[in-house]
Amino acid sequence: MERFALGHASGTDWKAVCQDCLQQLGTLPAEANIGFIYLTDYFVADSRSIVAFFKGETGLDRWVGTSGHGVLASGREYYDEPAIVVMAGAFPDGSFNVFKAGHGPLDELLDRHGAWLGASQSHFGIVHADPRTPHLDALLPQFVASTNSFLVGGLTSSSAGYPQIADTVDSETPFSGVLFSSGVEVVSGLTQGCTPLGPTHEITEARGNVLSSLDHRPALEVLKEDVGELLARDLRRIGDYIFVALPVSGSDRGDYVVRNLTGIDPERGLVGVGARLDAGRRLMFCRRDATSARADLKRMLADVKHRAGRTPRGAVYYSCVARGPNMFGPKSGEMGAIREELGDCPIVGFFCNGEISHDRIYGYTGVLSVFL
């Protein structure tokens, strides 16, 4: 199977949409052995029937996926409309393992898959996570360390439920997905949707998620200085435009995770952030900038294409719900840019409530992985 098979369609009747996707998939070769499926929240109530349909019609028993406010296919974005995207792939026998985490200790999951995990020294994983899961930002690094894996994926974004598809459909699973052995060739890249402003600061006083002092100065004073005089005059204008960037320790690419500003106390000079903060950690303020996001997407695509060295057989892409039409325009601009660089490569994915790369949950990013 040189290239993966792709199908995507929209409409209000799930059976008709599935039939359309199935027709696009065509007759699958014998070596096809796993399917990827993403559906918008319009179809969450029908997700079990939809997975059963594709299992029966394609003969593939292994499926992974979830739901989102929008889903992604090659050159096409379906945002806030009823749609389904599917992709069938082929991998060497024994080279992948579909998993589903329970609510018990992580050791229980590792014990169930211990024999398979022990057969390969490293792994690449696609993960879909429930954003309601407590301490997910701590659970994922534990999973990565225990499985020696590099993860990509995203948090389910839906107003209708949080289905996790891992062969079957479960709406109460913390996270699920598929791990691939080191024999599967994959190249991954991450693109940011925000641009740092000003220098990196040291957190010199904080309590929980509230910043009191940066560089031994009032936090709000530093924020005003970095955003500039125009915005500092009316801080109500910084909502959905100014954010906090927390540099990733040890990154050789200047990587950072973005978190929201949650509040400002002008009288006491305090700044609230959507993350726990500790004294001694580094922090930057950043802006959400469509022009910079397009430039960084182009940079990431060129880098992935160079490292891949050949045309991918298929790919997965996970993008923040705040990207897509909100940042790249209403005509599938983000997926169009990817298609322009990678060509007619089969791609599926969804708009996430948080993106996963390696062992961290990001925001306002896009995460691409291509299979060679």
Image (spheres, rainbow, N blue to C red):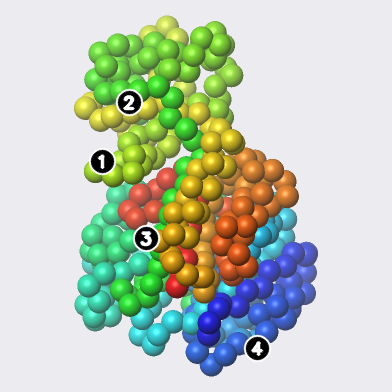
Task: State the separation of the CA atoms marked 1 and 2.
Answer: 13 Å
Q: Position of residue 201 (x, y in %)?
A: 30, 23
N-terminal of the pair, mark 3 or mark 4, is: 4
Of helix, strand and loop, which one carries label 2? strand
Of helix, strand and loop, which one carries label 4? loop
State yes or no: discs 2 and 3 in contact (Cβ < 8 Å): no
N-terminal of the pair, mark 1 or mark 2, is: 2
10 Å crowding of disc 3: few (<14), some (14-19), many (20+):
many
Q: Count every numbered label the image shows and give the total.
A: 4
342 left or right, relative to 195:
right
Q: Position of residue 294 (x, y in %)?
A: 57, 42
Residue 168 appears anywhere in the view: no
Residue 244 appears anywhere in the view: yes
Q: State the residue at coordinates (42%, 6%).
A: 267
Q: State the residue at coordinates (30%, 41%).
A: 248
Task: State the separation of the CA atoms marked 1 and 4.
Answer: 47 Å
Q: Which residue is the site of mark 2?
A: 200
Q: Which residue is the site of mark 3?
A: 151
Find residue 27 and name its label. Answer: 4
N-terminal of the pair, mark 3 or mark 1, is: 3
Q: Amino acid at mark 1?
A: Ser
State yes or no: discs 1 and 4 in contact (Cβ < 8 Å): no
Return the residue nearer the eye: 217 or 297: 297
Return the residue nearer the eye: 109 or 103: 109
255 left or right, relative to 260:
left
State yes or no: discs 3 and 4 in contact (Cβ < 8 Å): no
Q: State the residue at coordinates (57%, 17%).
A: 236
Q: Amino acid at mark 4?
A: Thr
Find residue 249 and name its label. Answer: 1
N-terminal of the pair, mark 1 or mark 4, is: 4
Q: Amino acid at mark 3?
A: Leu
Task: State the separation of the CA atoms marked 4 and 2.
Answer: 54 Å
